[in-house]
Amino acid sequence: MSLLSVSGLGKSYRSYRSEWLRFARWLYLPVKPSTESWIIRHINFSIEPGEAIGIVGQNGAGKSTLLKMITGTLQPSEGTVTCNGRIAAILELGMGFNPELTGRQNAYHAAGLMGFSNEQIDSVIDWIDNFAEIGTYFDAPVRTYSSGMQMRVAFAVATAFRPEILIIDEALSVGDGYFQHKSFDRIREFQQQGTTLLIVSHDRSAIQALCSRAVLLDKGTIIKDGNPEEVMDFYNALIAEKEGVCVTVQQLDDGRVQTRSGSGEASILAVNVHNSADQPAEFIRVGESASLRIKVAVSVALPELVVGYMIKDRLGQSVYGTNTHHLGCKLEALEADTEIEYRFNFAMNLGVGSYSVAVALHTADTHLAKNYEWRDLATVFNVVNMDREEFVGLIWMPPKVELVR
């Protein structure tokens, strides 16, 4: 049995010519609204125990509306939400907090609304205080808090007791890096214990590090549901989509899904990694001199062309990326029917593993300005350790050891 099931879910906002007509609609009389705006509609998905699901989409796609209906703080206009476990949610920073009450008092109030008794809250209040780490402010009015301090208390209260489902809406993007790491450790602890995670975030690394599945919302409907890397690649192409830009998805011979987008004024002809012997190579040694070669065709005259690349690990998480704009090497005033090969030379100071390269042709500093072509999985290579000391991790950065007595 699914832990959470969403069926035919939709939310609309209606206006009527008079409040009497609105009241008549509440009594289920057949009254038509003067205007009706659907925020989300026809949402269907289910979540199994222990899954970690990322909800992604552009601003206004309906992500927060969906989460509010799942948690019950917003009633759907159609469809149903069936939940077979306790939900803990962080939807908005300090939502439900009384600014005149202290953090401690708000913790008791919020946990009480979640269904816990005073005795249960007494048993964890010191943990909440210690986890939030806001010191004497815990007994000061919330109106004196920064947004980061509110997030600390809200997260500590929501995670004081392990829920069956933990829902987080962008809250972890606020606050300092230390507390973000601490929060992610707490989430992973819950995942290991079987908690289901539902998280909204624009942070690709967070989605791919925490989630086993991602759902992409666009204009109030689900347009993709699947592997986080594939969904995030498609989302990346979607946010660059403008008039005249085409987004395509195709399955490669190895079964992986490649996403491409762009307007086509410039296109990628070939992408290869060369080793120190100047040969195309599938395997590169740790620390070996390497060259990423990108061959580009320009079909029409362009005012400028920027070429960028991103190296990603086998989980699709970004390892290193740059482009010719940031390197001070962008080309200007290119003529039509021109072919150019870019060579990025570097030492392969990566850890052992399989890596892929995404390539983008654009203007300015990112492909969001003018996207000629963006291609994920443009090439794949493997790093092997044949003559270096043993080490673990994604990068090779050998230290020099000194002993001081």
Image (cartoon, rainbow, N blue to C red):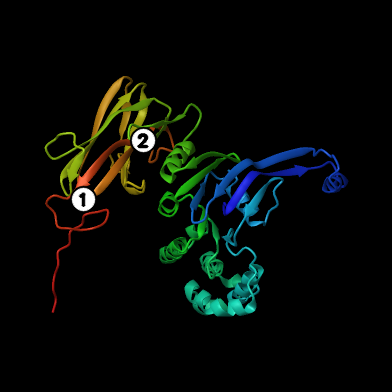
Observer-nearest of 362 and 285:
285
Observer-nearest of 55 and 85:
85
Residue 27 place in picture, x, y as percent: 85, 48
Residue 317 place in picture, x, y as percent: 36, 48
Regarding residue 125, the answer to whether it shows in the image is: no
Residue 212 place in picture, x, y as percent: 44, 50
Helix or strand or loop: what does disc 2 sit on?
loop
* Residue linked to disc 2: 255
Compared with residue 308, is residue 19 higher up or lower down, i.e. above or below?
Answer: below
Q: What crowding class fits label 1: few (fewer than 14 Cα within 10 Å), some (14-19), or many (20 or more)?
A: some
Quadrant for the C terminus, please: bottom left
Image position of 337 (left or right of 11):
left
Observer-nearest of 221 and 241:
221
Q: Earlier in the sequence, mark 2 or mark 1?
A: 2
Helix or strand or loop: what does disc 1 sit on?
loop
Q: Nearer the viewer, mark 2 or mark 1?
A: 2
Residue lying at the far top in this picture: please name it. 337
Compared with residue 337, is residue 66 higher up or lower down, i.e. above or below?
Answer: below
* Residue linked to disc 1: 349
At x 28%, y 44%, the residue is: 355
Q: How many marks?
A: 2
Observer-nearest of 149 and 107:
107
At x 57%, y 54%, the residue is: 3
Image position of 311 (left or right of 30):
left
Q: Amino acid at mark 2?
A: Gly
Compared with residue 115, is residue 135 higher up or lower down, i.e. above or below?
Answer: below
Q: Amino acid at mark 1?
A: Asn
Q: CA distance from mark 2 to mark 1?
A: 28 Å
Q: Do the residues under discs 2 and 1 have CB atoms within 8 angstroms?
A: no
